[in-house]
Image (spheres, grey):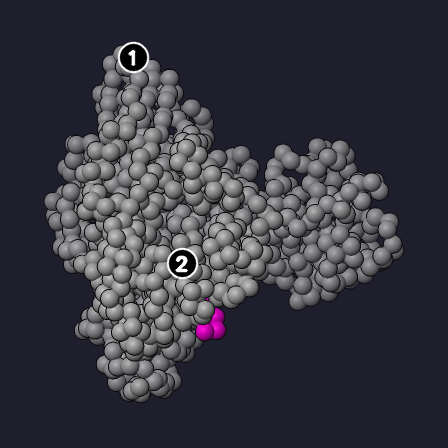
Amino acid sequence: MPEHTFRLNGKQVTVDVADDVRLLWVLRDVLGVTGPKYGCGINVCKACTSHHNGRAFNPCSVQVKDIEPTDEVTTIEGLAATVGEELHPMQQAWLDHDVAQCGYCQPGQIMAAVAKVRQAADQGREITDADIDEIRNICRCGTYFRIREAIKDGARNM
Amino acid sequence: MTALDPSPQPQPQPRPESDAHVVGRRRFLGYVLAAPTLVAAAELGLRPGAEAAVPSPGVAELLDLNDLLTAAARPTANLISVAVHADGTVSFELPRAEVGQGITTSTAMLIAEEMDLPLEKVRVTLANARPELLFNQLTGGSNTTISTYTPIRVAAAIAKGRLLHAAAIELDAAITDLTARAGVITSVLGGQIDYGALAAKAAGVRTEQVSVELKPRSEFEVIGTPRGRIDALAAVTGRKKFAMDLDVPDALPTMVCRPPTINGTVDSVANLAEVRQMPGVTDVAVIYTGVAVRAETFGQCVDGVRALRVSWNAGSAAGKSDESVLRELESAELPLAAPLAETVEGEFTFYFRGNSALEPNCAIADVRTDRAEIWGALKSPIVAQETIAAKLGLPPSAVAVHVVEGGGSFGRKLFFDAALEAAEISQQLGKPVKLMWHRADDCRQGRTHPMSTSRIRVSYAGDTVLGFDQRHTSVSTDFGHGLGEVLTAMAAQLPVGDLGFSETIFQLTQSMPYDFGVTAQLLSEVDKGFNTGSMRNIYSPDVTCARELIVDRLAATTGRDPYRFRRDFLQDDRSRAVLDKVAEVGGWGRAMPANMAQGIAFHAEYHGVSAALVEIDCRPETVNRPIRDAVSGPRVTKAIFAVDVGLAVNPRGLEAQMMGGIMDGIAQVLTSSLHLTDGYFLEASWDNYFYTRQWNTPLDVQVIVMPPTTGEPGGAGELGVAASMSAVACAYGRATGRMPTSFPINHGTLSFEPKPTEPPIPESPTDGLDHAY
């Protein structure tokens, strides 16, 4: 089987897996990194949201062969290390607002929130309710309102 | 005598502390169990009112020898127990399923309260299936805290009493000279010792029954205070483990190729051998629900499922559609009572709704010739164990069922469809499997909230309501999860028994909170061809929504304000208090622009009362706001919810449950339904089945947890749905000037292009990087 290598949460990893296997399964089934969750497999529910070179993406919809050796993939497990802290400010905001219910979607929600705040910052502005309306991540427990509050709080500390 | 004295004399009991003077405090019986460190226990059936038959409120009575022998001989297997460990932590195995509703946190709070221990020192895990608990290991009906509030505290109080007793010996002090605080016992004479150091010294050398008083509510420092979830850190760091995250050796990913129609069956497979040769695939096998594919990765399972060429037999809903089911319901509707005077009437239709959580159906099974092990989020693990054992041909005692924390449930995980399938596949392959349903499987073959209709006739004369008649007609609700007891599960498989059971549940859950004269609410059910279940709040969202819309119409017909009208007819102060609260906080009656309106509604259940006030925006520019692959539609802009559950153990958790209920209510009125066509549901994705998303979420949500009233906790998990759904429907009716009668309001417009049914699951895209942001 072909070998694929990329950077995952700050470390170079190498896997032996077919080219077309989606990255979500490389992370979960091959590498045992289970923070990104399966919720649909077709880039709709966003439960697997992680970062690719700092931008939010959904590994359920990317073939492993499309990840370059120097690409940095960050999952929820590696988020805090990107700021050199025990917790990323967005994770802390999630705790402060007691956002999670079942918690299944929350790794993806947090990764999406961080990217959305960065996106606004790159445009030289603070995140707005209209930005948050664009976040497509499903939370079937319906914690959306606490998510909104936590994103705004977390953004202030990013 | 020391704590470890094996002699048969009963041990002295700790003297009741500061409240020893309280007359009439109830005592409860529990146990100290023989164990290396302290383990205190109580019977799970223990409820308020079932206090111990110990007459004196004073110093704990010692049981006489006869009682002691009886107690010693009594089976203690049905106990729940708290264990104190040498590291100062206390552990408890909760015989319920945590699926997001927050019961591990509230349970830890009960223990922390009664033991005077910091919350972070309490570890709550989920118990394996324990068949000896019979009815008492079912998570449903918002009943967890109602049923466990007393026994958990009794066990914790006994543990604390033992610790005090052991400390008295260690510190050479009278128990009355000791204070327990934050896991440390301090003597007024000087000296202190922590719980960890006492764990072994306080251990029971034999099992004995003791009685105990519980901390009075006036001394609560934990119960009733808002606390964050104990698993929050694990959740936000990705460390929280769900079933599919477990590393069970050799349990490889497995999926099932499922039929194109509901409950279809395999006729033949053209290319089994070919699919077995696909990359990563280890096994392919025909099972009772389809064709199982086991592979190195789930991605390769998807490929295998999509490659299978299967001929299918028709399913249990062959040829059926929304229209045909509606006709079935209409023909099964029971007649209304004759009108008594002037009437207001209405008929409402509620389409099928998906009961899927975000975590799809899934389970791990490792079945060997003589035993089996199952892992899954199971709310009815005893029935699961019995049923799986029967299917495998093993005795139940040979089937270990591990209850894993679930990624949502909303009633869905009362059933164990995936666990049963996983067990069958594992047995057939002779290998462990990690079975997961694809999202499309969950949508099309999963459990649903049954489609229903509700017809109401209210008779009135002047300002008096003379009678309220409601006929609820529903596709059959499957209660075959047995509400925790396998005999009931078997009885429920009988057509007559099941029908009676549904009606019983209906009558037990429906009540009339208004003084509406002669009231009759009746259920009739039809058609067992669908996979249904007890979706969050079961019948109540639909029944209540219909009722509250008619209340609005009645108020309008008689020229009265919807809030005032409800207030005048509600039956008690608790009910009026929550209604008043939302009216006050939400500014009931404030002027709104055209096409915007408020709605208000009330619901009582689970020993609690609730009211919701929402504001909705139905202006064209809002309804038609563009959002890719989505239903935009009217937006609820504000939601105010007041809830009185009697006593909120964790107000912050209760608030979270009500928020979830609000989002469910919004979804069920505005966006969420399944479309039945030719024996299958068109939906196969979260962008087909539109649960509430951020763009539908109100920007102003306030939940008001009322101060304690009854002093006993009511249910929380399901309570938020009915009043929310009703308030949204009422608001929509007032904003548009037309009472909605069909739910969700957009059901008549298909907002997506249906995915094919063969192959049954879609291919994963490859362009994910193009959508990065």
The quadrant where residue B740 appears: top left
Question: In the rendered structure, which amino acid carries the disc numbered 2?
Answer: Glu
Tag of residue B421:
2
Question: In the rendered structure, which amino acid carries the disc numbered 1?
Answer: Leu
Image: B114 above or below B122: above
The residue tagged 1 is B340
For the stretch drawn in magenta, the main secondary structure is loop
Residue plotted at (23% across, 81% down): A66
Q: Nearer the viewer, residue B115 or B590?
A: B115
Quadrant occupied by the N terminus of chain B: bottom right
Sequence-first tag of 2 and 1: 1
Residue B139's x, y, as percent? 48, 47
Image: A32 above or below B144: below
The quadrant where residue B46 appears: top right
Does B260 lie within the magenta span?
Answer: no
Helix, strand or loop at mark 2: helix
Asked whether residue B43 appears in the rendered view, the answer is yes
Residue B681's x, y, as percent? 23, 50
Asked whether residue A43 appears in the rendered view, the answer is no
Mark 1 residue crowding within 10 angstroms, few (<14) / some (14–19) / many (20+): some
Q: CA distance from mark 2 to mark 1?
A: 54 Å
Region of the chain picked out in magenta, as a range: B246-250
Q: Nearer the viewer, residue B686 or B310?
A: B310
Helix, strand or loop at mark 1: loop
The label nearer to you, 2 versus 1, is: 2
Image: B458 above or below B693: above
